[in-house]
Image (cartoon, rainbow, N blue to C red):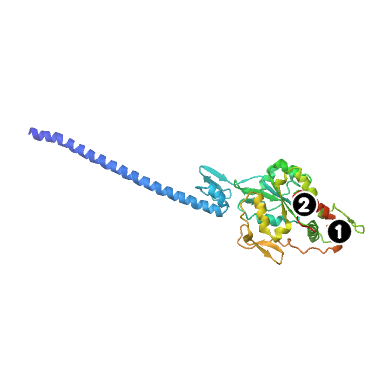
Amino acid sequence: MAAFHHRFHHHPSAELRRLFHRVTIASSMSILCFSLVYLLTGFYESQLTESSGIRQAEFLLSGSARLNERNFAKEVTTSTYSGHTGLEVNISGKELIATRRLPQALIIGVKKGGTRALLEFLRLHPDIRALGSEPHFFDRHYARGLDWYRALMPKALDGQIVMEKTPRYFVTVETPARVHAMSQDVKLIVVVRDPVTRAISDYTQIISKTPDIPPFESLAFKNQSTGQIDAMWSPLWIGLYAQHLERWLAWFPKTQIHLVSGEKLISDPSGELGKVQDFLGLQRIITDKHFYFNKTKGFPCLKKPEGSSKPHCLGKTKGRTHAFIDPEVMRRLRDFYRPHNRRFYQMAGQDFGWQ
């Protein structure tokens, strides 16, 4: 009876201890298995996230962010794309945001030299963000201030060059000092062309808008019988390149001014674009594969311009048939420009070969 009483009191307690021990072991095993599953799942998800980030970065490389391979290799490791034009890329804990900045490069001239063609060609480059229209800030709208000017610029990522073109800047007296006040490091591009051909092109554009203006000869000469040239008539005055360049060199070193041959921009666009890309410190991405020559217009055209898969030539206002000018008038104009051209060649350190 005593033995039975002993088992009755002590056996349940032993069973409970064994049961508690089993529960403890089972719980520990469950926790261990859950931990292993969690770690493996987390690793798999991190691999997916990294892979997704790389795919998104590759999308940015060829899409709206337009990052070139050089910047991609240097800056992008993992990224996320926000899906709007503001563009935010998370890179190693920091964000890349496209912002509006003041231009670092300007195409400042000259009118009827080929500035529109140059701008359209340069916009092919993924590291260039260029304003399409001419803002005329430094010659007409300077009183509006730099904040107004900045607001006109396209958004750009860090490392991309913001630029605009206004050909009137080159010949406007106040402009060099104003540009220098904005930036002492800005890079300046001037497209120059045979001043006689340029003047006739300028006049051709004028008569297309105002057909009733006097003939070229009567405007180009103060006295046609004596052959005295009116150098202050705008189409002729613009062609006095040495006079205008001298004003810019008073504010900027020659190393910050690049001269593009308007003639070579037509005959060898990839060669001229290569020099411009070098001047801007960019990789030579725009090459001869981007161009074809349109025999009808007499100008090179783009095979695939920015934002399009179709070939593109400049508008119908480009490549007009020039007004006929008497050969004797042409000869007198060439004689007039000859000393000015020689002085310009010396200043530029380059002979453009104008006759």
Task: Please tell me which residue is depicted at 26% across the width and 41% down the height of the picture.
Answer: 25
Nearer the observer: mark 1 or 2; the answer is 2
Task: Please tell me which residue is depicted at 68% across the width and 60% down the height of the picture.
Answer: 268
**Residue nearer the viewer, 53 or 277:** 277
Q: Position of residue 94 (x, y in %)?
A: 53, 42
Res. 334 image quadrant: bottom right
Task: Please tell me which residue is depicted at 23% across the width and 39% down the height of the picture.
Answer: 21
Quadrant of the frame with the N terminus:
top left
Q: Position of residue 3 (x, y in %)?
A: 9, 34
Dot 2 lies on which element?
helix
Disc 2 crowd rating (10 Å Cα; few below 14, some 14-19, many 20+) is: some
Marks 2 and 1: in contact by CB < 8 Å?
A: no
What numbered label is drawn on residue 332?
1
What numbered label is drawn on residue 241?
none
- Left or right? Give the position of 276 relative to 338: left
Whether residue 167 can be seen here: yes
**Residue nearer the viewer, 233 or 95:** 233
Q: Amino acid at mark 1?
A: Arg
Q: Position of residue 8 (x, y in %)?
A: 13, 35
Q: Amino acid at mark 2?
A: Tyr
Q: Position of residue 311 (x, y in %)?
A: 64, 63
Whether residue 214 can be seen here: no
Dot 1 or dot 2, earlier in sequence: 1
- Left or right? Give the position of 87 relative to 15: right
Q: CA distance from mark 1 to mark 2?
A: 20 Å
Q: Disc 2 marks which residue?
A: 345
Task: Please tell me which residue is depicted at 34% across the width and 45% down the height of the picture.
Answer: 36
Res. 331 image quadrant: bottom right
Res. 248 image quadrant: top right
Dot 1 lies on which element?
helix
View extreme (left): residue: 1
View extreme (top): residue: 2
